[in-house]
Image (tube, rainbow, N blue to C red):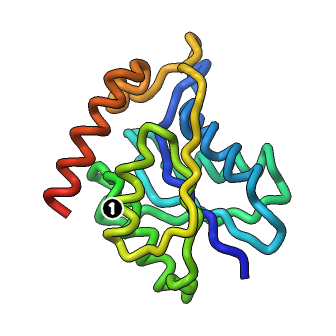
Amino acid sequence: MLNPIVVVPDGISVIDNKIYPSFVYRAVLEKAAEIWKPNQTIYLAPANHFGFEKTEQALGGEFLKKNYPKVDVSVIPTDEIWQKNYVDTYMNAVMTHTFFLDNEIDDEIPIILVVGKIHARRAVLAFEKAFFLIEKVIEVDYPDCAKDEKIVRRLFYYNYRWLHKIYEFLAFWRDKLIY
């Protein structure tokens, strides 16, 4: 059996008044599709909607199905209780693990975690704390945000790599202390 690929969601952008996975999330999705093999599933971890009608993972699923139609993708739903709250990286991992258990997906098979490079250290911490075994972490670098693309306000720091790195550093230590 091939290791499941788990993708950590990474934001929503608006381009020409339409919502899409953010520039970071698109790069992560493209890398997951690139490494995918037949009989392997890409699981999109549950996340946020940022006030839009679709979640990050739903947009990610649409992106993969449109651009990589042969890829087997599973869009994990966000638990109803979290629909009105912000889903952080630890809750991405917990809900993914719960989905694996509820759907009898063997959680003892190590996963391949595909995540944006700046976010990777914290994602590994979260998924390990949520009882995942990790075979491999693929840290995905990505281009800067295009001028015609607007990242959701909550993730404004994605436009400034230096600020994004500071945010992730602080968030890593916060998560290490509280989870």
Badge 1: how crowded within 10 Å, few (<14), some, or many (20+)? many
Residue 16 appears at what percent x and percent y?
A: 61, 18
On screen, residue 172 versus residue 124, left or right, reads left
Answer whether residue 103 is visible to the viewer in this image: no
Q: Amino acid at mark 1?
A: Met
Residue on which the image places disc 1: 91
* Residue nearest the observer in this picture, 119 or 152: 119
* Residue nearest the observer in this picture, 131 or 41: 131
Residue 42 appears at what percent x and percent y?
A: 66, 63
Q: Quadrant of the N terminus?
A: bottom right
* Figure quadrant of residue 105: bottom right
Determine whether 67 is above or below 91 in the image: above
* Figure quadrant of residue 168: top left
Count the marks: how many? Answer: 1
- SS at circle 1: helix
Question: Which residue is painted at 21% across and 57% down in the image?
Answer: 176
Residue 71 appears at what percent x and percent y?
A: 78, 59
Q: Quadrant of the C terminus?
A: bottom left
On screen, residue 175 versus residue 153, left or right, reads left
Answer whether residue 105 is visible to the viewer in this image: yes
Q: Among all residues in the image, which is located at the extreme front? A: 136
On screen, residue 137 versus residue 161, left or right, reads right
Residue 158 appears at what percent x and percent y?
A: 41, 26
